[in-house]
Amino acid sequence: MKYLRDIGSYFIMLKQVFIRPTKTSVLKNLIFKEINDLIVNSLGIVVFISFFVGSVIAIQTALNMDNPLVPKSLIGFATRQSVLLEFAPTFISIIMAGKVGSFITSSIGSMRVTEQIDALEVMGINSLNYLVFPKIIALLFYPFIIIISMTMGIFGGWIAAVQGGYSSASDFALGLQEDFVPFHIVYAFIKTFVFAIILATVPSWQGYYMTGGALEVGKASTNSFVWTSVLIILANFIITQMLLG
Amino acid sequence: MIKVIDIHKSFGDEEVLKGISTTFEKGKTNIIIGQSGSGKTVFMKCLLGLFEPDSGEIIYEGTAIQDMDKDEKSELRKQMGMLFQGGALFDSMNIEENVMFPLLMFSKKSKPEMLDRVNEVLKRVNLVNVNKKLPAEISGGMQKRVAIARAIVNNPKYLFCDEPNSGLDPRTATVIDNLIQEITQEYDITTVVNTHDMNSVMEIGETIIFLKDGKLMWSGDKTKIFKTDNEAVTDFVYSSDLFKKIRDAQQNESK
């Protein structure tokens, strides 16, 4: 019963986000601030993780190639497929659920416990539009992060494979181009778009409807990470089955 | 003027407000007192339109808030200023931005005009050279004064204050009380103050209502509250040792 109520309140929140909009000039500044907080400030960790995970994928593939008949280009091929299809869109989104999701929940939750949200409402401002709408718009730039992640993942794989002596640069480049299906890019970005909406709205819902004090803000942030991750994994399964199955 | 007629509010099976009727007058500091759990905060949230009463009416200048559509409610709220218990200043904004916020949202003034108004109200609450500081960098008393400045910057018709003195030392509390009263008279607004601090009642209580268990048990002013025979009120007023001693001293003197 509680889950049904929660799902209902989540969709009611989504409806409220888009009504009674905040003044355009104010909203514009809020959107730029959110792009900085949620997108630009996440670039460092995304670049770091993507580079090294791409490297490890390449090394692991190379180390598991026992058969001399298997071409070295497989290292580039496996790195490309792993990074484009799953690592960049899905696993970076799980990491972002921890980084961005917790940030959103704790910032909105802190505003709830210190009555800042009540202050907005008393002033006649639609607090959901003021707080959540700019985050949704900012996270529409999320595919930009995933492009960076894909690029850095493949670059990391190339460095590890070539500098580690597992493959030549030309073999790796050949593998990157082998059996390339352009629709896989479309599939990755459809997933990314859905994950962006989950990343913006689920943590906002957790923060907005929390009650209690500082301890509850911490609990809400943890719940936010758990539920955002669960929904990303489920959405990943459904989208993959629908588009590639 | 705000008129309240027989409002009831329940949460689940628990009835928190049990038929409160009263009037809050313009140009006066109207005080709501009562113990914790008496329904003061729920009552104030009903007045603000944050909670909808189950029955009864809250009438602002002749129009019941329940009969207003969303746009009318939104317009009404633009005429309200609210001083929250903890100040509720926006952490991410500096003092100037906090006070300017309602103007930025609702007024058509230019930026220099807004800045002039911000400086004017900050000066009115005796705050200077704090414009660029963050709320975390100033004291609790100063935060309350910034919150008052933000509440009055848009020339509201109604000012609501929830426990304005909580967490303040007695001297600062008196400064805040006097400021609320001065602003009420100066701007001729309807002010409603929610408190359980008897010092505030003595300082600024022009009209007072006493709530207990969700019911209005007594109403009057600060001169009458110490003379009433209402047992619930005397229990509350003389629950502090200080007031008990004052009463005993007065009784001894009269003997």
Image (cartoon, coloured by chain):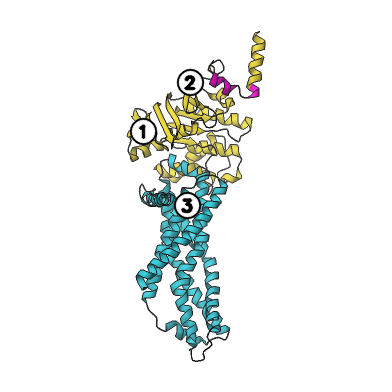
Chain colours: A cyan, B yellow
Magenta region includes residue B232 = yes
Please state which amino acid type lies under the numbered disc 3.
Answer: Gln
- Identify the residue at horizontal 63%, vertical 30% (top origin): B171
Mark 2 or 1 closer to N-term?
Answer: 1
Look at the picture and state if B184 lies above or below B75.
Answer: above
Please state which amino acid type lies under the numbered disc 2.
Answer: Ser
Element type at mark 2: strand
Please state which amino acid type lies under the numbered disc 1.
Answer: Ile
Can you name the residue that lies furthest to the top here? Answer: B255
Numbered range of the magenta stretch: B225-242
Residue of label 1: B65
Look at the picture and state if A58 lies above or below B213.
Answer: below
Q: Quadrant of the C terminus of chain B?
A: top right
Residue of label 2: B219
What chain does badge 2 belong to? B
Residue of label 3: A206
Q: Quadrant of the N terminus of chain B?
A: top left
A152, A186: nearer the viewer: A186
What chain does badge 1 belong to? B
What chain does badge 3 belong to? A
Tally of numbered discs: 3
- Identify the residue at horizontal 52%, vertical 77% (top origin): A57
Q: Is residue B190 visible?
A: yes
Label pair 3/2, CB-CB below 8 angstroms = no
Q: Are marks 2 and 1 on the same chain?
A: yes
Image position, residue A163 (x, y; %): 57, 83
Cα distance, mark 3 to mark 1? 30 Å
Image position, residue B124 (x, y; %): 53, 34
| Residue A138 image-quadrant placement | bottom left
Q: Nearer the viewer, mark 3 or mark 1?
A: 3
